[in-house]
Structures are given as structure tokens and as C-alpha cells.
Image (tube, grey):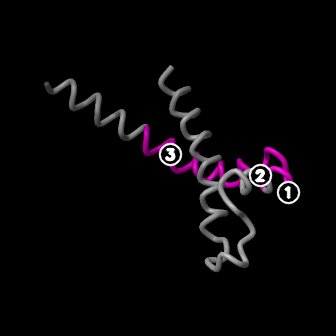
Amino acid sequence: MTGTRVCELTRSRVRVCSIQSSMQSDNPDKMHRKYSGMLDCTRQLYQQAGIARFYKGFTPCLLRSVPANAVMWLVFEKARSYL
């Protein structure tokens, strides 16, 4: 159950990160920006490559978060057993 929640949180965070990084890499000059806002950015990214565009970079994120979460739960369980 917890693993499913962690995976879902990771997937939803990847979608947000995809939009955020696209907006951050946009031109700082307001006159030359590609995106007028978050919803416009989301719409344009979806038009470029469909839903797969939001999962670009999901594998490296998962490869990083799975071991980190495993260590966190191991430490948590060990600390709890000492209490």
C-alpha cells in the first residue's frame, strides 16, 4: 500500500516538474516567452508529444527515489524498534 502511494506521488511530481522546468527555461523577457502561464505551458507540452511528454525523465527520477525511500523506511523501522 505504501509503495503504491510513493509511486503515485512520484508520478504526479514528475508531471509538475516537467511543466515547471519548461517554464523556468523559458525566455525571461516577457515579450519573447513561449508560455503565457502554467495552463498554456501544459497545453503546449501536451500538443507537442502527448501525455508521454509529461513523463520524460520519469525513469531517472524513479531510479533515484526507490533506493532513497528504501533507506528511509529501513532507518525508520530500526529507529522505531529501538524505542
Which is nearer the N-term, disc 1 or disc 3? 1
Q: Secondary structure at mark 1?
A: helix
Look at label 2 and name its amino acid. Arg
Labelled pair 2, 3 in contact (Cβ < 8 Å) = no
The span shown in magenta is: 45-69
Query: CA–CA distance between discs 1 and 2?
Result: 8 Å
Where's residue 8, x and y in %? 58, 32
Circle 2 crowding by C-alpha within 10 Å: few under 14, some 14–19, many from 20:
some
| Residue 12 % position (x, y) | 60, 39
Q: Secondary structure at mark 2?
A: helix
Amino acid type, residue under disc 1 in the picture:
Gln
Residue 78 found in image quarter: top left
Specify whether 40 is left or right of 60.
right
**Residue extending farthest left:** 83
Residue 70 locus on image (x, y percent): 43, 37
| Residue located at (64% from left, 71% from top) | 25
Element type where label 3 sits in the image? helix
Q: Is residue 39 left or right of residue 77?
A: right
Q: Quadrant of residue 83?
A: top left
Foreground residue among 24 and 69: 24
Q: Nearer the viewer, mark 1 or mark 2?
A: 1
- 1 or 2: tag closer to the N-terminus: 1
| Mark closer to the observer (1, 3) | 1
Residue underneath mark 1? 48
At x 85%, y 53%, the residue is 49
Q: Are marks 1 and 3 in contact (CB under 8 Å)?
A: no
Mark 2 or 3, closer to the camera = 2
> Which residue is denoted by mark 2 in the rendering?
53
Residue indicated by mark 3:
65
Give the CA distance from mark 2 to mark 3: 20 Å
User: Is the C-beta separation of discs 1 and 2 under 8 Å?
Assistant: yes
Residue 10 percent location from the top left of the image: 56, 40
